[in-house]
Image (spheres, rainbow, N blue to C red):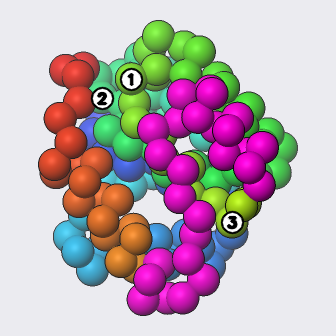
Amino acid sequence: MNIGQPVEILLVEDNPDDVILTLHALRAHHLSNQVQVARDGEEALAFLFDPEKNGPHAPSGPRLILLDLKLPKLNGLEVLRQIKADPRTRSIPVVVLTTSREDRDIETCYALGANSYIIKPVDFEQFTSTVHTLGLYWLLLNQGPES
């Protein structure tokens, strides 16, 4: 990622295989112009809130955050809580993309302001299709507020 270039997607994922699959799916459908990967919750928050990392203090933050819940250092629920509590990042769409099927996690994510909750498909083709649909909707079809 080049500093100064707008980040379209912040992918918060600690599983290297899921990072590779997600990036592959985005590239295959030409939706991966600028993706920043954070491998734990602390790294995600540092990217979003540290002016040195092109966060909201810089001209352009991400247009979409794909957030796993099961993360090292700081879990996805706490990351989501901090994103939605801060006026600088509150309007960024957050799609929870996780393996958790727990009703408690789903309810908590929506209560905290998640825009969508998707359980990761285990099948490669279905995973690719899901990521493609996410990127297409949130980056091309959805109209968000002006930054």
Q: Spot the residue most to the top.
A: 87
Above or below, comparing residue 24 to residue 144 in the picture: below
Query: Which residue in the protein does label 1 denote?
Result: 91
Callout 2 amino acid:
Ser
| Residue located 59% across and 64% down the image | 119
Marks 3/2: CA–CA distance: 30 Å
- Return the residue at label 3: 99
Quarter holding the C terminus is top left
Residue 127, image x and y in percent? Answer: 47, 78
- Residue 125 part of the magenta segment: yes
Q: Which residue is mark 2?
A: 60
Residue at image x 44%, y 15%? 88
Task: Specify the amino acid type for callout 3.
Answer: Thr
Marked residue nearer the N-terminal end (1 or 2): 2
Tag nearer the camera, 3 or 2: 3
Looking at the rendered structure, the kind of residue marked 1 is: Ser
